[in-house]
Amino acid sequence: MSGTSPQEILDTLLSYIPDDAKRYTGDVAVFVNGSVDKAADKLRDTLSNLPEWVPESFRPHAPPPPPPVITVPVGALERVQNWVSRHKILTGIVVVAAGTVVYKSYKASISLRKHRRAKRARSGGRLEVVVIAGSPALPLTRSLALDLERKGFIVFIVANTRDDELLIQALARPDIRSFALDINDPTRVGASIEEFARYLQEPHAAIPKGKKSHLHLKSVILIPSLNYQTSPIATIPPSSFADLFKTHLLQPIVTIQAFLPILTARLHPPPPPTELASSLTKDPSKQREKEDLSPKVLVFTPSIISSINPPFHAPEATICSALSAFTEVLAAELRPLQIPVTHMQLGTFDFTGFTPAQGTKFQSSTAGRGNQGLLTAAGVEQTHNWPDAARKTYARNFLSQSTSAIGTTGIRGMRGSSLKDLHDAVFDVIDGTITASTVRVGLGASVYGFVGRWVPKSMVSFMMGIRKVDELATWQGSAHGSPRSNLGGSHDGEDEERMAGSESFISVAPLEGVAGENVWKS
């Protein structure tokens, strides 16, 4: 131990003390110091408040008063900054909403200023052709044809019957023409398509003895029928389903199938010799962009019913969903061929001037008790045609949904969107401004799409007035027996006649002794 300094000995001893003991010792020292300070302050206050007979030498001097607080007025910018720092989430929501509104307003202003006109030849003749495959009796077909003709297109409307041709002629527009296409006769369909192809390949002159130009097929627009039956599934006979599938689903599919040879043939007009010689010296990529003349396919479907799939709308929900799936498959097949396919999902539009007061579903609904009374009367009259058991089971919910605030034809009391929104969207798709595969346009198209995707089905049904039915119909056997009871002794024709002549609906009432079992009534 010789030669070791006292400091080294002290450090060695302190090194054996645990770290926790050091920390506890420090905490005790802090506590003791704080307690002593508080006791000193208390003693000082007590001595300073002693009676007057205590000498002044024993009285401690009072602490100096704190400095005065000077209030500086806060500016508006600082108040806003303080509010933003306290409400960061709300500020983010407000910024996103305001940015969306500004962006939408900017896009709307650009859309309003856009000059929408079809290309014309140097002589002033029309060059671009649009084919509308839809019934001319539909207001949507007539309004779209008139708008496209006014913007400089040659419009062909597919006519399946003589009555359709008369309706097209009644429009009295020289550049709105009928395209006879009888899809029930495959040989005539092929002849009509070949004749139309020759028409596109031949040069045409706007005036007699004028300069001729070749036409170009710009787009094929498919507008299926928009009229659907609203009724419980139990009251719709199988023949009605078969007719609806044929006219509303099979006919649009066959029509598009008939136009596929023209769409994939790319009937481009041959370039003049001068342009052909100059094109050899130009950039090939720019030349391809200039010759991007691929026709576009537009498929229209109503989107409100297919988005939420409400009760009593099985035909429309089924057919629109099938057409949507068909459109996706068609787009996937034509995408490698550089033929764009756009699915136009429609909401509610105001067809004032194209339909009478009680028109198709896409006419805007008017607010007021009078209109609600008309809807109720129409629904009551429709339920009278149902069987007694079906009326007892479904009538109340059917009438409640028909008169609900968010009915299946849109938001009651609000007028439909202007037809100009639809016309502008169609033109922007045709000229390539809009390249999205799905375009929602019309009142309720986006709202009901969001509701159908994110809102629970039970909540949607409750908002439409659908309530639980406590008293159900009871089973009543048929005098003819079940059509399946005599499988070996009856022929198919007799079964069909017997099923067609009898009532056909599903009774949801359980049989006695069998809980929860559904049965057929025939």
Image: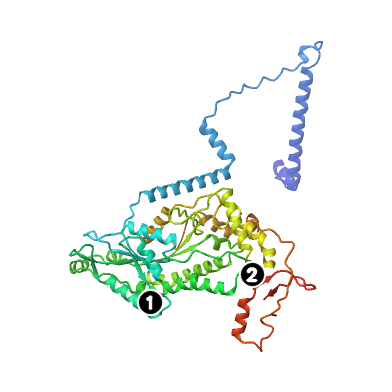
Q: Quadrant of residue 432?
A: bottom left
Classify mark 2: residues with Cα within 10 Å, few (<14), some (14-19) or many (20+): many
| Kind of residue indicated by mark 1 | Val
Q: CA distance from mark 2 to mark 1?
A: 38 Å
On the question of residue 455 being in view, the answer is no
Instruction: Report the quarter where the C terminus lies.
Output: bottom right
Q: Quadrant of residue 508?
A: bottom right
Q: Residue 419 location, x and y as percent?
A: 43, 54
User: What percent of the width, then of the height, locates residue 115?
Assistant: 33, 52
Circle 1 sits in a helix, a strand or a loop, which is it? helix
**Which residue is depicted at the point 62% across and 57% down?**
401
Q: Position of residue 252 (x, y in %)?
A: 45, 71
- Residue 475 visible in the current orientation: yes
Q: Nearer the viewer, residue 387 or 418?
A: 387
Q: Nearer the viewer, residue 278 or 176?
A: 176
Question: Mark 2 touching mark 1, by CB under 8 A?
Answer: no
Tag 1 residue: 189
Spot occupied by residue 351 in the image (x, y as percentages of width and height): 45, 55
Relative to 220, residue 412 above or below: above
For disc 2, the marked residue is: 234
Q: Amino acid at mark 2?
A: Ala
Secondary structure at numbered mark 2: helix
Query: On screen, 521 above or below 383?
Result: below
Which of these two is toward me, 47 or 126?
Answer: 126
Q: Is residue 381 left or right of residue 243?
A: right
Please tell me which of labels 2 and 1 falls first in the chain: 1
Dot label at residue 340: none
- Residue at the image position 73 percent from the left and 40 percent from the top: 26
> What is the image's colouring?
rainbow
289 relative position to 19: left or right: left
